[in-house]
């Protein structure tokens, strides 16, 4: 299956997803130990497949889907362990508009942490920042990022490592100044 345009790409994704949907669901249930969220996570896998620009590079669709599903499940578990804490601009607006009606200390701490992370990310070169965000926030593998940004997997790995070092160094120096 070699898609050549957007319609063919969407058809390819739909065909691949339909073929492996049952296996994907079982895989996600095993990973999460509950079937309640597996449909939502399968939908996220489908959306990530749709975002793939060059799906003709995918030689083994089943393995690729499982890789994406593994990342999605890991992100889901991490969020659950953190109590579902994800930065939400609506929460930030609520804190700033009505601080008496919301648990302000916790939300403001989260907002401050999010601002610090954004400032650290802005210090990175654009390609390093893009690679780092795709890896850490979106949970894409080096190969997925490489395909998406037209880089080699080795370069992606190097950029993630360099970005991590720069962010840790900057965070360390900021803490020392405080």
Image: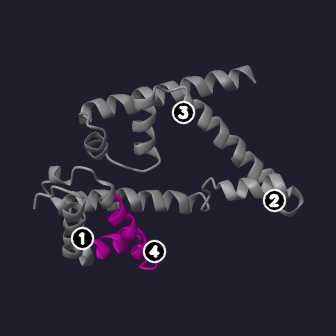
Characterize the local packing of mark 2: few (<14), some (14-19) or many (20 or more) Cα atoms within 10 angstroms: few
18 left or right, relative to 40: left
Q: Label 4 neighbourhood size at 10 Å, few (<14), some (14-19), many (20+)?
A: some
User: Foreground mark, 4 or 1?
Assistant: 1
Q: Which residue is mark 3?
A: 121
**Label whose residue precedes the other's in the sequence (2 or 4):** 4
Q: Residue 37's mark?
A: 4
Question: What is the span of residues highlighted in magenta in the rendered image?
Answer: 24-48
- Tell me which residue sits at (19%, 71%) in the image: 15
Secondary-structure class at tag 1: helix
First reached walking from the N terminus: tag 3 or tag 2: 2
What residue is pinned by disc 1? Answer: 14
The numbered mark at residue 103 is 2
Q: Earlier in the sequence, mark 1 or mark 2?
A: 1
The vertical placement of 47 against 152, above or below, is below
Residue 102 is one of the magenta-drawn residues = no
């Amino acid at each position: 299956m070699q898609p050549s345009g957007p319609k063919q790409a969407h058809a390819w994704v739909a065909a691949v997803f339909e073929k492996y949907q049952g296996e994907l669901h079982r895989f996600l249930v095993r990973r999460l130990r509950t079937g309640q969220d597996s449909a939502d996570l399968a939908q996220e896998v489908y959306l990530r497949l749709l975002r793939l620009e060059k799906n003709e590079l995918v030689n083994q669709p089943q393995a690729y889907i499982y890789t994406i599903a593994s990342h999605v499940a890991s992100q889901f578990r991490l969020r659950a362990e953190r109590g579902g804490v994800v930065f939400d601009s609506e929460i930030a607006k609520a804190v700033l508009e009505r601080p008496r009606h919301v648990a302000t200390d916790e939300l403001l701490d989260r907002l401050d942490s999010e601002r610090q992370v954004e400032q650290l990310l802005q210090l990175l070169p654009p390609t390093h920042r893009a690679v780092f965000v795709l890896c850490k926030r979106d949970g894409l593998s080096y190969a997925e990022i490489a395909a998406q940004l037209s880089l080699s997997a080795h370069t992606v790995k190097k950029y993630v490592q360099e970005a991590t070092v720069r962010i840790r160094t900057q965070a360390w120096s900021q803490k020392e100044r405080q």
